[in-house]
Amino acid sequence: MIRIVVDLLELLKLMENEVVAAIGPQSSGIAHVISHVVNELHVPLLSFAATDPTLNSLQYPYFLRTTQSDYYQMYAIADLVEYYGWREVVAIFVDDDYGRNGISILGDALATKRAKISYKAPFTPGAPRSAIDNLLVEVNLMESRVYVVHVNPDSGLQIFSVAKSLGMMSGGYVWIATDWLLSLLDATEPVDADTMNLLQGVVALRHHTPETDLKKNFLSKWSNLKHKATAGPAGFNSYALYAYDSVWLAARALDVFLSEGGKVSFSSDPRLLSMNRSSIQFSSLRVFDGGPQLLQVLLRMNFTGLTGQVQFDSDENLVNPAFDVLNIGGTATRRIGYWSNYSGLSVIAPEILYTVPPNTSTSNQHLYTAIWPGETTTTPRGWVFPNNGKPLRIAVPNRVSYKEFVAKDKSPPGVKGYCIDVFEAAINLLPYPVPRMYILYGDGKRNPVYNELIDKVAQNDFDAAVGDVTIVTNRTKIVDFTQPFRESGLVVVAPVKRAKSSPWAFLKPFTLKMWLVTGAFFLFVGAIVWILEHRINHEFRGPPMQQLITIFWFSFSTMFFSHRENTVSTLGRLVLIIWLFVVLIINSSYTASLTSILTVQQLTSQIEGIDSLIASTEPIGIQEGSFAWNYLVNELNIAESRLVKLKNQAEYFDLLKRGPKGGGVAAIVDELPYIELFLSNTNCAFRTVGQEFTKSGWGFAFQRESPLAVDMSTAILQLSENGDLQKIHNKWLTHNECSMQITETDDNQLSLKSFWGLFVICGASCIIALAIFSGRIFCQFRRFSPENEESDNVEEIEPARPRRSARTSSFKNLIDFVDKKEAEIKEMIKRRSSDKKQSAAPSSDGQVNSTP
């Protein structure tokens, strides 16, 4: 501490001279103090090593950071944590402004990735080895195995030395060091082999500086100086490169400042005249009059230095912050990627990525394979169960009903049931041991309230809850659930009675619309066949009443394939074949549906489902402790006065039997697994009505951010895939098969939508046949028309008749023509053709005789 004060006093004594710009210091702590001084003296302070993110332009306008802020470094570490899938880290840091403020930013950065700092382990600057040893022993008892080390170079290596002696540099551990470590190694040439042995598997960050020709030439010259000198200069790290660029930045800025007419002048500050204590003459400290102008010149400078582009953004930070991600192995370091705030983690250099659009999506984050402590390339899980002798505290609901799912047991582990077997099977699949103890929750006299149980887990009274715990929205907000191991959902169960037989049961197979359309088609097809057969088939001729009866008889007799009339025409036979096929399908479907209706037991209930239950005012049974109470009250707005809590299956049966009029309930709303078991134990005396109106599942609840929830979800999926989950189900929940749901008669009725295709085909064939028949009739009518024949003989004798009378006569003639037999029409056409030939012969002879 005294040394820091001495260094600070020496710097203040330096400021007694007329100074226009200052470069340094190397410590964030000293930079905080010096920034106050340069603010008063209007002297720009260029710091190439003070990375504390709280040193900002708002509080210290004359502080100008010429290196990258730890703000970006902490976000780079957060991206690393997210990339490898870790959720918690332990922060080991030096307890000063540099350490505390950097770790504070790390906490904010991790929060954006849904991760956190589970434990902060600070130590004082210059702490002895014993203090660090005690600190790491305490850290080793924690659950997280991901350590972020943010310290000063003077004490950093001692942390890894102690960690190695404690066995904390072996497999399963993760060590991430900020830029201090590689800055120390780069400045030390050559690096001691024992030092490298301490750091095997460590991942560290380093400021990224592009490999430009300017940088290569400078390093080459620096190397030559080392060879010429007896005691060569030390190695060059990134901070040395930033210091070099800081000097050039100050020089270039001063050149621009002077060329723009800036003047180097100073003035006294009256507040400093009376402060002449100690060895510092405060009255000699003078204010730089051109400070504001020089500061603006510095902020708009833009040139390429050894570290890349030297330019400041609107927040007075260097543009394009980027870091190298390196992995220490063997006797050297290996770059496994880069980080930049432009594209996140990548194996491509940031200066190349700047030429393409930014992409920080998760799928675009890449790093090469790292070698972790223990010489393994498998990414460590990042956590273990705390090595403090405390087993996992698992709360188990102490149920008084449906004990097949979970119940108290006299033998170890103290509980049993379907849910317990699933949990044990899943936890045995984990690649690590899980010490655990089961704690019953509830007094054993009634089912516990499950919402309260989940609250206990969220409040750290328990580490997990195992049992028939339903995954619902309000619970997922405070705890983490595993993958569901059992499907569930709310259903309505109600008393039912056998439906009475109806004398009109024979009408139930078809809907009303189906009956009407079928009857209409019977008449339609009968009429079409009569039209097609009337002219050529004597069975379809006779008086009008007889023909009408024939149409009806023929139409409905096809239902039983007992029509006695034979079809003669080709079109009539085509229509009849298609219609008989339709009748065959309809008859078969009707027979099957009627058989099902008459043979299957039909059950009815006054409650048809959740909608009718809401509309009624009758009491509803609810299992005590179930989430169904809150759901019905809050979501479905059912009055609490209608809900009756049920303790066990005996109350289920008794209240359903008694019904609302006998002091019971009209129906019970409960989850499907319970109802299946209840119906089986009561020999299916009741039934579910309506559909399952919620969809959910049962899962195991853990505290938020617990990594065990993820591993258990994977284990549950494995149980499902290998069939063990079904075996456990069969062991505990085998029940008699029975129809779970009432069969609705309306659901068995056949509607028009099942047969409309057949009717379309049949109707289309009838229309086509009728069109062909009509075409033939009109052709014959045009060839032979009584009016045309009479008009040839009496055209000159009879006066013209009114047009309307002629049309009526023509339509009547058409009807008479259609009603005639086909044979008579052909005979008349033949006779008329013969008469025309005979009348044409004498006329031809007369013309020949009169020819000269």
Image (spheres, rainbow, N blue to C red):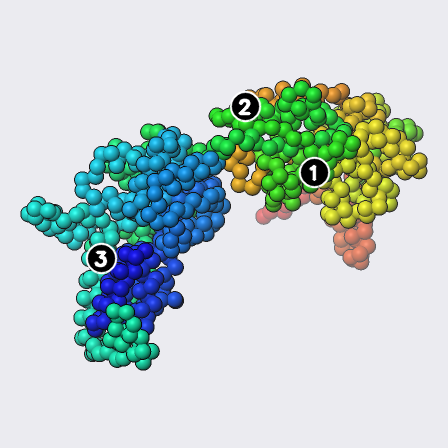
Real-space Cα distance between discs 3 and 1?
63 Å
Name the foreground residue: 495 vs 168. Answer: 168
Mark 3 or 2: in front is: 3
Real-space Cα distance between discs 1 and 2?
26 Å
Residue 450: give its label.
1
Mark 3 or mark 1: name the one nearer the start of the chain: 3
Mark 3 or mark 2: name the one nearer the start of the chain: 3
Give the image location of residue 723, x and y in percent: 58, 21
Name the foreground residue: 636 vs 835. Answer: 636
Name the foreground residue: 843 vs 524. Answer: 524
Image quarter hosting the N terminus:
bottom left
Give the image location of residue 624, x and y in percent: 77, 36
Residue 307: give its label.
none
Q: Is residue 107 above or below residue 488?
A: below
Residue corresponding to mark 3: 243
What amino acid type is highlighted by mark number 1? Answer: Tyr
What amino acid type is highlighted by mark number 3? Answer: Ala
Name the foreground residue: 78 vs 1. Answer: 1
Query: Label 2 near label 1: C-beta < 8 Å?
Result: no
Q: Is residue 79 above or below residue 491?
A: below
Residue corresponding to mark 2: 428
